[in-house]
Image (cartoon, rainbow, N blue to C red):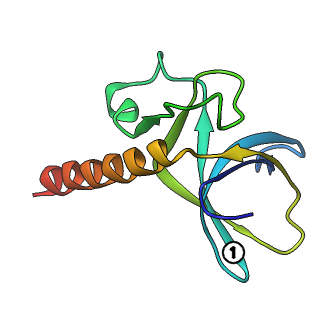
């Protein structure tokens, strides 16, 4: 597993004893931890605030996704690497890697302007 891989991880729900597999974009891999962003197909019904945090994956088919999808850049999730069960989906294209970097810089500058 490496940066810019798309994988499916089993995510447990705190409220219940259940969970489900969710696609994520790997942001960083260290010896003990994996950082990732959630990937979603749900976009249209989200608020304007949430939508501004969603990067639309341009090359979603070549990344191994079945439907148009967005990367939720609003939160970074950290998972312990030990014992992590995942299924490989694909890899983010160079185009999307470059565009998501620009998107994140733009998102960060918007947040700084709002805080002032």
Which residue is at the far left? 116
Q: Residue at x 88, y 58 (%)?
A: 85
The relative height of residue 57 versus residue 113 in the rendered view (above or below) is: above
Which residue is at the far bottom? 31
Q: Nearer the viewer, residue 100 or 81?
A: 100
Quadrant (top left, top right, bottom left, bottom right) of the N terminus: bottom right
**Which element type, helix, strand or loop, lies under badge 1?**
strand
The image shows a total of numbered marks equal to: 1
Quadrant (top left, top right, bottom left, bottom right) of the C terminus: bottom left
Position of residue 75 measured from the top left corner of the image (x, y, whole percent): 50, 53
Q: Nearer the viewer, residue 68 or 49?
A: 68
Q: Nearer the viewer, residue 47 or 40?
A: 40
Position of residue 114 measured from the top left corner of the image (x, y, whole percent): 16, 49
Position of residue 16 measured from the top left corner of the image (x, y, whole percent): 84, 43
Q: Is residue 62 left or right of residue 44?
A: right
**How would you rate the neighbour count of disc 1 (Cα within 10 Å): few for under 14, some for 14-19, many for 20 or more?**
some
Q: Nearer the viewer, residue 1 or 73?
A: 1
Which residue is at the far top? 44
The relative height of residue 75 versus residue 53 in the rendered view (above or below) is: below
**What residue sits right under mark 1 in the picture?**
33
Q: Residue at x 90, y 46 (%)?
A: 17
The relative height of residue 45 versus residue 79 in the rendered view (above or below) is: above
Q: Residue at x 20, y 54 (%)?
A: 109
Answer with the quarter of the image where residue 46 lies: top left
Q: Is residue 41 left or right of residue 108?
A: right
Q: Is residue 102 left or right of residue 18?
A: left
């Amino acid at each position: 597993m490496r940066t810019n891989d798309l994988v499916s991880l089993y995510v447990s729900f705190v409220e219940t004893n259940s969970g489900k597999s969710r696609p994520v974009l790997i942001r960083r891999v260290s010896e003990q931890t994996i950082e990732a962003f959630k990937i979603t197909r749900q976009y249209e019904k989200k608020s304007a605030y949430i939508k501004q945090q969603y990067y639309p994956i341009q090359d979603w088919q070549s990344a191994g996704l079945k439907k148009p999808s967005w990367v939720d850049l609003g939160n970074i999730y950290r998972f312990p690497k030990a014992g992590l069960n995942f299924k490989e989906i694909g890899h983010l294209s160079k185009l999307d890697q470059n565009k998501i970097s620009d998107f994140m810089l733009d998102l960060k500058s918007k947040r700084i302007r709002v805080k002032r």
